[in-house]
Image: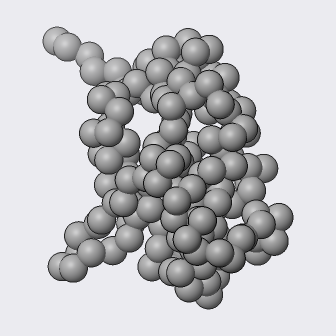
Amino acid sequence: MKTIIEGGIDLETHAQGGLRSCIDGRFVGATRRAFEQVTGLGTDDYYHASNAGGVAAPSEGGIKSEDDLVHLGRGVRILGWQGHLDVCGGFPGERDSVLVRRILTGFVERVDRYPDANHHGFVARLGPNETREIDVYTPQDARRFLAKNKTTISLRDGRR
Ligand SMILES: [Zn+2]
């Protein structure tokens, strides 16, 4: 007989990466696969925390504090930050054009806050025929986008 133990990995000592995403279940699976594809990490190799709004929400909004993502397992140096379009419960009534700026502004804030890590930004959205599409941003991509779209969104103004 073989016993399969799920969730037995001690992420506190073994996590190599951290991912923060919105709790919206439409995008969690696709976001995890995108993060794994971009980083080469396996599904048990990283710590995943989710909150309403993901990276677009202030860092205090998470189930776990954001520092957990970085400091759990000492030496976590691969971080993913996700938010999504197509209606987010973290920002009721917000248009996609505003959501994408919130997401990328939050992403760049985290990049600046944790300068020793490698960062990947993810903007998830609905595609045709029930597909999910994930736009992957480097920090440079995000800064370029925000420079072109002049309106600056402060996270402190975020509706919670
Ligand atoms: Zn959401």
In the picture, the quarter occupied by the N terminus is top left
Pick the front one: 149 or 133 = 149
Q: Is residue 88 above or below residue 31?
A: below
Q: Position of residue 116 (x, y in %)?
A: 62, 25
Percent coordinates x, y for residue 67 in the rendering: 71, 32
Locate residue 50 relative to residue 136 in the image: left or right: right
* Residue drawn at (38%, 53%) of the image: 136
Of residues 130 and 57, the one drawn nearer to the viewer in this rendering: 57
Q: Position of residue 137 (x, y in %)?
A: 43, 52
Confirm whether residue 33 shows in the render: yes
Q: Is residue 21 visible?
A: no
Task: Please give the name of the residue rendered at 59% of the width and 65% of the height, measured from the top-left corner.
Answer: 146
- Say how many tags the image has: 0
Q: Is 17 or 11 nearer to us in this picture?
A: 17
- Quadrant of the image for the C terminus? bottom right
Q: Is residue 1 above or below residue 135?
A: above
Q: Where does the image place residue 122, in percent across and percent down from the top left?
A: 44, 54
